[in-house]
Amino acid sequence: MADGDADMAPRVEDVLDVDAGAFGERAEADAETVKALLAEGAFDNHQSIVGLEYEFYAVTEGRWRGEEGPGDTYGLSRVPRRLLGLIGFEKELGLHNAEMTTSPQPLNAAGLRAQNAEVRARLSAAEETTSAEGMRLVSDGMWTIPPAGETAREYLTDSIVDDGVRIATNMSDSVRYHAMANGPTVEDTFTVDAPHVDLAADTVMPESLITSIQPHYQVPNAEDLPTYHNLALRVAGPLLALGVNSPFFPPDLYAAGTTPEAVLADGWHENRIAVFESVMNAGVGAEKVRFPDDLGSVEEAVDRIAADATVVPMDVGDGDRFDDAFATLRRKHGTYWRWVRPVFDGATRSAANARIEFRPIAAQPTVRDSVAFLAAFAGLMESLPRRRHPVADLPWETAEENFYAAMRDGIDADLTWFTTDAAETTHSDVAFDDLLSHAEAGLEDAGCSEETAKRHLAPLRHRAEAGVTPAGWKRREVRERLDDGDPFPEAVRGMQREYISTQSETLLDGSFAEW
């Protein structure tokens, strides 16, 4: 049983006893409070501000457990809860996860430098602590080697029932996570829908296969949030195409009889998208995880959160934070899962903000690559509205098609883009050049020198020009191992060990371009 799960059942029961209807009414009342604060300008900032959420999973280095052999190195590892506090990270869904959230910084040269420095400093300190425990934190889109002595299927599906409440054995001790599998609207199983994959569980634990980065962009004027949100939908497909990093599942999760050739031919480049959508949507019978519709007003953004299907109607207590004035809406926002989503919060009125969270990108091979996506997204949010880029007129349906095409085919996807002169193009090299040129211009608008802007985006330029993504690298590694005669499970494990080994040399000071 996971740490802290001994007293989990009564607390989950308390959540399940909450009147969902009353919870919804409180959320609607909070929405009116937020809209009144918006009218007062409470969420406006004098400049753009950026931040980053960064998820990792832990693996064992195999040098502290005598029973492990070379084949067990880099197997998934549970992170002792005491370590998370020591390294300043937060728990995520799985016991193997750790999440870092950076301090918000102004979007300028110093702010981006601070984002990079904070990630590197905190990750470096964390590595020293976890290394002493025989573990390593990995920046990746999906793990593929389960803990030593376990299968991935066992790890993801193991659960117990305690006083009528279903508890996932390897899930963090968060009431919110466990309540998702016990609410009145959930289905009997949570099934992953991806080519040739056969995985169903009775909790949301399969979602812990995946890890991501989430750039945040606080908008200067909250009233303009719909403009940024809708533009973020237009750039989601191309940025996802450059960032794909989860082409393989743990081998034992593929359906019996599936051939390696079928996996390579039919498998998607970003299975993280499919895992999150299929598992979390199955849990509530609604499309909570999806490519969202355009927004017409900032008030509409607030109303969408309030009206979203309720998953965990947890009571919230009184508090003296600024955003405690709309605490129920803020709680509900925690399960407002969209690939691009608006957020309204702030501990104090001076810190209150309206922001866009950009959620499609998997965790990347190196810190520099991850920060490159933060810089690219922020630069685009600066440049595109200022220059009234024609891509704002790209039909929503086309933007959605781009997104799922990128999920399936990565950098080789057929994408449609409007260039600066309003010409429609399906040539990816033209689209990526226009995209990154405007990201660079946006960074310069924010105060970066031309050299600094180019340096921040260089990792993505390399991918666009070389036609190589982390997912493509992984597929090539598996293909080569298969050609050398390795069985498919060993080909995937060999690829994963090579990924982690190469990352250990480049995570803090290199980039994927060096791989």
Image: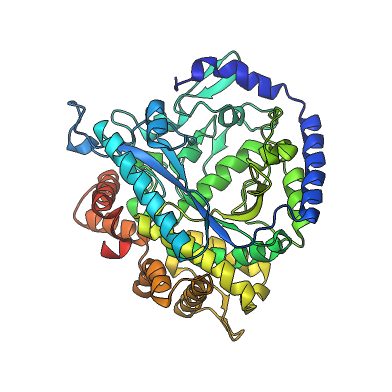
Whether residue 111 appears in this view of the structure is yes
In the rendered structure, the answer to whether residue 301 lies left or right of residue 413 reads right
Q: State which quadrant residue 182 falls in.
A: top right
In the rendered structure, the answer to whether residue 275 lies left or right of residue 485 reads right
> Which residue sits at x=58%, y=69%?
382
In the rendered structure, the answer to whether residue 113 lies left or right of residue 397 reads left
Identify the image quadrant of the N terminus: top left
Identify the image quadrant of the C terminus: bottom left
Q: Which colour style is shown?
A: rainbow
Q: State which quadrant residue 161 falls in.
A: top right
In the rendered structure, the answer to whether residue 501 lies left or right of residue 445 reads left
> Which residue sits at x=77%, y=47%?
34
> Which residue sits at x=31%, y=45%?
124
Relative vertical location of residue 357 with respect to residue 74 in this rendering, above or below: below
View extreme (top): residue? 163
| Residue closer to the observer: 130 or 499 | 130
Locate residue 309, reporting x and y percent: 72, 41
| Residue closer to the observer: 329 or 36 | 36
View extreme (front): residue? 350
Locate residue 83, reporting x and y percent: 37, 30
